[in-house]
Amino acid sequence: FVCFLWDMQAVGTMRAVCASMNMKIKTIAAGRWRWKSTFSAHLQKDINNPFQGLPALEKAIGRKVVARIGSNESIGMPRHPLAEVLPGDLVDLCRLYPDPYSRDLRAKLAKLAPGAVEDAAHVLLDSGGDSLIFLTLRTRIVPGDCVITSRGTYPTFNYFCQGLGAEIVEVPYSDDGATCLRPDLAGLAAAAHSKKAALVYLANPDNPTGYVFRPEEVAKLREQLPPDTTLIVDEAYIDFSPENALCERLHNTVQIRTLSKAYGLAGLRVGYAIAAPEWIQKADQIRIQFASGSLTAFLVDTVLSHPTFSKELMSSTLEWRTRLEQELVSCDATVLPSATNFVGIRYKSAEDALSRQQELLKEGIAVHRPPHAAMQSLLRVTVGPQALDPVVIKVLTR
């Protein structure tokens, strides 16, 4: 069923009709088809946040609020326990409600390389990349909808989809049996068409293999997908391969990034999405309020105010990765090419990988073996000094 909207005054009425049928709206503009909306039917109407925050109130009244007696925050105490570890102004950041939209931090994140965007209208902040994957699914998925992913990629995506009642279709990796193990982009596109998928997930760089696609390859995937199939490009590790970042905003695509890896902030849980302003606005209507606290925003701002830190962290990480790769290869280990802060090692069997993992666990050393059956012959090792410990190298390469 397709809505032909020749009379643009009828758009509102036709939208309601299409939404009631849980279908997508297409309009005719300038003589060609143009994608209009891919939100779930129940999200076609605007949802108004009852708590816009003090920054919105100050903008509305045209002046600064000098007395916060409407937010039901606790009174300030002279001997707050946090005062033993934090100065008074930071204690207040913990005591008072934050800006629910993190407006200032969004503006800073919009300017982050690689692939900086025009302004904060393209950026949404949430508590880590995982939260943004879940939020993207919530904007698009209702029970029974089909999603496409790679068989053995980042498992949290499947975890969220199961909780939302989605049908999960997994496409096998492209595999040469040695060191080339990567998502099958053509297979993902074909499955999206055959299953009329609502959404496709791609981690780029991939987790757990570390493989990275060039931006033109990701753009080609987008072109091959149905227009109303949403594409998630999870760029959690893209800072380690900035030349492969998506700098062009792709149609119906949500890019997800994090400050966990290249900024050393995994414990603060800060991630951001880059997408069309229309998607940002809708996602803002349904995301958890106050997803990022004021103290977190202060700490992130402190790190971002030292732009050389991230460069130094990534440079050091890449040096450790090179050393680890060289050490493993010199011992005849099968090492997957990596564009991340980890190295994947491929073994002849899942049992072989498991025995090595268990041997290291007995020494109190945790390496990761992916939980998916398709990837259990891999071990994923985070790069750094501990990964080059002789005990670790011996077990990984025996």
Image (cartoon, grey):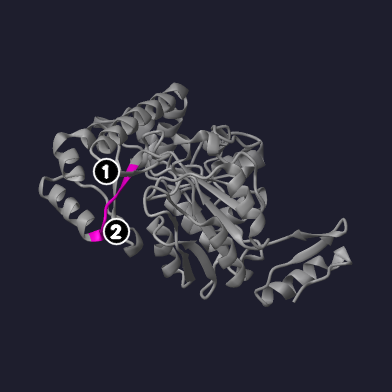
Q: Amino acid at mark 1?
A: Ala
Q: Is residue 4 left or right of residue 64?
A: right
Residue 4: quarter of image? bottom right
Horizontal relation, residue 352 to residue 236: left or right: left
Residues rendered magenta in the picture: 343-350
Q: CA distance from mark 1 to mark 2?
A: 16 Å
Residue tagged by mark 2?
A: 376
Q: Is residue 281 visible?
A: no
At x 86% / y 65%, what residue is drawn? 9
Q: Is residue 9 left or right of residue 139?
A: right
- Residue occupying the point 47% across, 58% down: 134
Q: Residue at x 72, y 73 (%)?
A: 18
Disc 2 element:
loop
* 10 Å crowding of disc 1: few (<14), some (14-19), many (20+): some
Give the residue furthest to the left.
Answer: 362
Q: Amino acid at mark 2?
A: Gln
Marks 1 and 2 close (CB-CB < 8 Å): no
Does residue 371 lie above or below 211 as drawn? below
Where does label 1 land, which residue?
333
Q: Quadrant of the C terminus?
A: top left
Give x and y (percent) for residue 256: 51, 47
Coordinates of residue 164 in the picture (x, y in percent): 46, 69
First in sequence: mark 1 or mark 2? 1
